[in-house]
Image: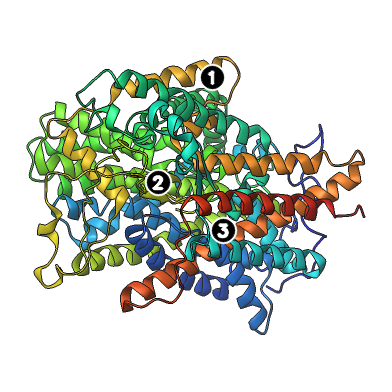
């Protein structure tokens, strides 16, 4: 079928990012019922190629550097470039299909590399199929569970949730299609974001994190009171904050203030009177730095808050759930030609009958996997496998909405925190049923792998749904693209994990908490920057959270082939954290239930006073260095919107600000891929390509804050230069 030619409007429709007025309807860029090329052989093949390339890259980077990479934005840019090189220019919707297939790479890599390398760390039995099937089942489950809620997130919540990453992708795709002045603005914004983050990350021209711990005059707060402030000086996070907006950015930062300015100092003060370690810490609190107190205690309060916020969201969404089930049942039993249930192309999902059939197939296959492969040698394997599949489905269902909400708000999903909670709950249940040792750890770990990938998929898919809603893609095309793409990505990710395990091995890095005994002994904390990617990966596949791992009882040295023991094992920080949790629970350790309980109370309190509990809990869980620049970007966006009383002028400035912010995010995403490639080449060949300036001392600390402020000023005045049309 030939493609209808349609003039692309100047950017997205005027009401794309705001709430609709009573009776107002949003019309996407391509509203036609038919005639637009969307799923073509070209888009499928190029999408698969992107999935293979980025799945391998994302897996290696997550295991080597402890961070994910954003794949959706680079793939979108590459799709535009590919379109310009071929005889027939690809349509906007073909590029969406390429992105949907290719972006599964980061999703599957995030879900798999966060959990499955723990198989090797704990010396558990494995094979290719056993690893491959876990992310595949999880990814498909994530797609199927989110489909009934698509309309709620993209249509019912239109203008109420910012979808920052989706906004950036939409601006990149539409501007690339339209060209003109907007393309120039986007191009130089991408260039600025890439160069800025390259100087910061690759060359270390200044400190990535501005921190009060580097200021000698703040020693009283740093070492006595344990009150610190950090700010990640990235261009991408500044742009992300502008897209998120002041409302959610303020709530999220308030959560960080609760963690860093209230809980940490209180625990530090009380801990100064206690000379013995308090679980889950391994040394006395008095010997911990502020970051260690946050990691070992306050962060778990945030996890409890996230879990409670998920339950609250389920309760609030109960009418939506009932409505979605009603629509699904109505579609299942509709009569042919029933106009009441016939949907437009832009609102057509995979038929609910197919969704239900696929869900039943995935459920049965997952149960068979647990029954005849994972638990086959245990007594009462049938009963245990039923419990395993029940836990998998219930927790996935509860946390799917949490993951989708988090990404819709800030493009960061706390899948590592939710997966840790899943592992703990599952491990406690299994241990009470008498499962111990390898069998208990293996079953728990594989359940966690399915859940982790399902949550990662939901976070990515909700962004793609919103992108399709804005542009006019067919939802079922996006859904099938993700199901197809996750098969390819699961194969590649599994092969990469096993290959890296054989070549390098995965180390359980010894990482005793930093002892803040004297001011000069400032030590770097290993940070898992996975969101300015997530994912946990980039934006969707992941999140940003410091990961300080403990050494599990099983020495990883045994898993490294003797021929390659001289190679440096890969850190795999998230998987090490999962392994440490399982070793503790199935050994003598206990989950920090008291800290989780504190999080439950906090979530209930903020809900009672009308604050979004998920946003607040995310702020408590995520490191303050991520949330502070997001608030700074949001404030810049607020100032832009208040820069004039003329509505048309404000609209023009706001739109340009969104475009610049999207460019900064895209530049940061491209830099993430480029930086990882450079580091890989340098490491593999023992050479230096990019000089490391190492300017991370006190001067570099202040310089980072200054250049970040200059970038914020540039963002404001550049957006303010826009004129009303």
Whole-percent x, y for residue 705 in the image: 59, 48
Whole-percent x, y for residue 16 in the image: 75, 47
Pick whichever, 43 or 631, lies toward us: 631
Quadrant position of the C terminus in the picture: bottom right
Disc 1 is placed on an element classified as: helix
Residue at 36 percent across and 47 percent down: it is 525
> Is residue 338 visible to the viewer in this orientation of the structure?
no
Which residue in the protein does label 3 denote? 477
Mark 2 and mark 3: span between their CA atoms?
Answer: 19 Å
Q: Which of marks 2 and 3 is in front?
A: 2
Pick whichever, 521 or 358, lies toward us: 521
Whole-percent x, y for residue 192 in the image: 65, 64
Quadrant position of the N terminus in the picture: bottom right
Which residue in the protein does label 2 denote? 454
Disc 2 is placed on an element classified as: helix
> Is 222 above or below relative to 319?
below
Which residue in the protein does label 1 denote? 606
> Is 106 above or below relative to 184?
above
Q: In this view, does 65 lie to the left or right of 123?
A: right
**Dividing the picture into quarters, in which one does residue 186 lie?**
bottom right
Pick whichever, 217 or 125, lies toward us: 217
Mark 1 and mark 3: span between their CA atoms?
Answer: 39 Å
Q: Nearer the viewer, mark 1 or mark 3?
A: 1
């Amino acid at each position: 079928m030939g493609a209808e030619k349609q003039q692309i409007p100047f950017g997205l429709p005027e009401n794309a990012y705001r709430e609709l007025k009573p009776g107002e309807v949003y019309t996407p860029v391509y509203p036609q019922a038919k005639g637009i090329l969307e799923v073509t052989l070209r888009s499928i093949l190029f999408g698969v190629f992107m999935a293979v390339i980025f799945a391998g890259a994302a897996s290696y980077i997550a295991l080597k550097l402890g961070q994910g990479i954003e794949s959706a934005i680079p793939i979108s840019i590459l799709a535009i470039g590919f379109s310009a090189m071929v005889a027939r220019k690809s349509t906007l919707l073909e590029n969406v299909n390429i992105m949907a297939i290719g972006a599964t790479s980061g999703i599957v890599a995030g879900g798999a590399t966060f959990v499955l390398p723990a198989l090797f760390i704990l010396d558990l039995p494995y094979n290719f199929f056993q690893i491959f099937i876990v992310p595949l089942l999880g990814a498909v489950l994530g797609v199927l569970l989110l489909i009934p809620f698509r309309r709620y997130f993209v249509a019912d919540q239109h203008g109420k949730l910012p979808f920052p990453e989706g906004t950036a992708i939409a601006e990149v795709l539409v501007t690339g299609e339209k060209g003109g002045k907007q393309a120039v603005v986007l191009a130089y914004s991408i260039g600025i974001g890439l160069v800025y983050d390259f100087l910061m990350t690759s060359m270390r021209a200044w400190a990535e994190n501005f921190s009060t711990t580097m200021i000698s005059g703040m020693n009283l707060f740093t070492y006595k009171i344990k009150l610190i402030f950090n700010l990640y000086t990235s261009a991408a996070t500044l742009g992300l904050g502008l897209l998120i907006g002041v409302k959610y950015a303020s709530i999220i930062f308030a959560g960080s203030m609760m963690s860093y300015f209230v809980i940490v100092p209180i625990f530090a003060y009380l801990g100064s009177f206690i000379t013995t370690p308090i679980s889950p810490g391994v040394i006395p609190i008095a010997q911990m730095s502020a970051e260690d107190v946050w990691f070992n205690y306050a962060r778990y309060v945030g996890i409890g808050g996230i879990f409670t916020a998920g339950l609250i969201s389920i309760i609030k969404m109960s009418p939506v759930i009932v409505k979605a089930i009603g629509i699904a049942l109505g579609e299942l039993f509709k009569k042919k030609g029933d106009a009441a249930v016939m949907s437009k192309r832009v609102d057509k999902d995979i038929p609910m009958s197919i969704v239900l059939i696929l869900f039943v197939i995935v459920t049965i296959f997952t149960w068979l996997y647990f029954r005849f492969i994972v638990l086959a040698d245990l007594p009462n394997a049938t009963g245990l496998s039923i419990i395993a599949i029940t836990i998998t489905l219930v927790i996935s269902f509860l946390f799917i909405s949490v993951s989708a909400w988090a990404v819709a708000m800030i493009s960061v999903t706390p899948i590592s925190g939710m997966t840790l909670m899943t592992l703990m709950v599952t491990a406690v249940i299994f241990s009470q049923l008498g499962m111990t040792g390898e069998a208990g750890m293996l079953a728990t770990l594989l359940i966690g792998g399915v859940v982790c990938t399902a949550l990662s998929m939901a976070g990515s898919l909700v962004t793609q749904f919103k992108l399709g809603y804005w542009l006019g893609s067919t939802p079922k095309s996006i859904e099938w693209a993700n199901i197809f793409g996750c098969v390819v990505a699961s194969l590649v990710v599994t092969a990469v994990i096993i290959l890296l395990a054989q070549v390098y091995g995965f180390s359980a890095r010894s990482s005793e908490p930093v002892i803040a005994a004297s001011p000069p002994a400032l030590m770097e904390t290993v940070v898992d920057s996975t969101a300015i990617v997530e994912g946990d990966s980039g934006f969707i596949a992941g999140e940003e959270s410091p990961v300080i791992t403990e050494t599990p009882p099983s020495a990883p040295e045994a898993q490294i082939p003797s021929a390659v023991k001289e190679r440096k094992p890969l850190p795999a920080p998230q998987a090490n954290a999962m392994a440490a949790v399982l070793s503790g629970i199935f050994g003598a350790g206990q989950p920090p239930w008291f800290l989780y309980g504190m999080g439950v109370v906090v979530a209930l309190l903020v809900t009672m006073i009308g604050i979004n509990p998920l946003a607040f809990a995310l702020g408590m869980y995520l490191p303050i260095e991520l949330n502070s620049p997001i608030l700074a970007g949001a404030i810049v966006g607020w100032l832009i919107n208040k820069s004039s009383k003329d509505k048309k002028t404000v609209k023009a400035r706001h739109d340009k600000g969104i475009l610049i912010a999207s460019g900064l995010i895209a530049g940061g995403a491209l830099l993430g891929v480029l930086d990882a490639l450079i580091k890989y080449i340098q490491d593999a060949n023992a050479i230096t390509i990019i000089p490391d300036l190492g300017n991370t001392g006190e001067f570099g600390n202040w310089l980072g804050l200054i250049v970040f402020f200059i970038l914020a000023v540039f963002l404001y005045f550049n957006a303010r230069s826009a004129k009303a049309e």
